[in-house]
Image (cartoon, rainbow, N blue to C red):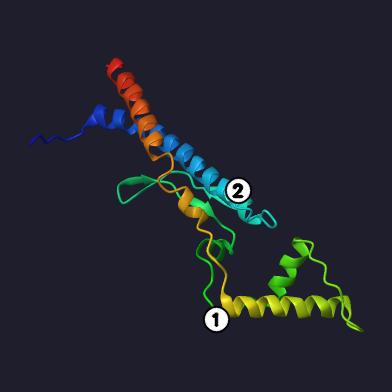
């Protein structure tokens, strides 16, 4: 077994690798986010675009000794889209009405019913249907996991080699 301690200049030189590692991770995270967004768009799961626009890639940070970035949507309904909802959950009629407006769903009033009452009636019916049947899942986040992992590792290796060459040539 070979053991050793990093001291002085070596520590400083190894620390120079951190920006390269962080940059590669952030770029890989952006590609993961793009693949998730593409799956939503290609799956015709975009109503308002809020979910697609909500994707973020955090700056790289060291957590438990590992460099990590977090990738994903921040929209509150992302979990419902990804995992679906089981029967028994009833969406609020007001949320359904907002969704109807975004999708330009126009409800024709019956008899003496006002347009607002017609919207309330239809939103209630949709909400009741969700309560009875649930919403089918659309696991868009799975598209990004594992995507480009090999590419990110290869890029990290190349950048690490360049950085090591730079460090060795600065002796």
How many residues crowd around disc 1 within 10 Å: few (fewer than 14), some, or many (20 or more)?
Answer: few
Look at the numbered disc 2 and give the secondary structure of its residue.
helix
Q: Which quarter shows the C terminus?
A: top left
- 67 vs 78, left or right, is left
Q: What residue is pinned by disc 2?
A: 42
User: Looking at the rendering, which quadrant does residue 87 occupy?
Assistant: bottom right
Percent position (x, y) of residue 58?
49, 47
* Furthest residue toward left: 1
Q: What residue is pinned by disc 1?
A: 88
In the foreground, 13 or 56 = 56
Look at the numbered disc 1 and give the secondary structure of its residue.
loop
Q: Which residue lies at the image location 82% right of the left edge and 78% below the top edge?
A: 118
In the foreground, 34 or 163 = 34
Percent position (x, y) of residue 22?
42, 38
Q: Which residue lies at the image location 66% right of the left edge and 77% below the top edge?
A: 127
As drawn, 169 above or below 101: above
Q: Which quarter shows the N terminus?
A: top left
Q: Which residue lies at the image location 54% right of the left edge and 71% below the top edge?
A: 85
As drawn, 144 above or below 110: above
Do the residues under discs 2 and 1 have CB atoms within 8 angstroms? no
Percent position (x, y) of residue 151?
40, 34
């Amino acid at each position: 077994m070979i053991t050793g301690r990093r001291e002085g200049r070596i520590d400083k030189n190894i620390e120079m690798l951190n920006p390269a590692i962080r940059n590669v991770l952030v770029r890989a995270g952006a590609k993961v986010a793009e693949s998730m967004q593409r799956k939503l768009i290609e799956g015709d799961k975009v109503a308002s675009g809020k979910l697609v626009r909500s994707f973020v890639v955090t700056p790289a940070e060291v957590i438990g000794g590992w460099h990590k970035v977090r990738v994903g949507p921040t929209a509150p309904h992302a979990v419902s889209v990804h995992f679906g909802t089981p029967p028994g959950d009833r969406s609020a009629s007001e949320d359904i009405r907002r969704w109807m407006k975004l999708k330009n769903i126009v409800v024709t009033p019956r008899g003496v019913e006002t347009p607002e009452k017609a919207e309330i009636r239809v939103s209630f019916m949709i909400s009741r249907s969700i309560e009875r049947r649930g919403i089918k899942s659309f696991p868009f986040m799975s598209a990004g996991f594992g995507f480009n992992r090999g590419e990110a590792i290869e890029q990290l290796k190349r950048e690490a080699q360049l950085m090591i060459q730079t460090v060795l040539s600065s002796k």
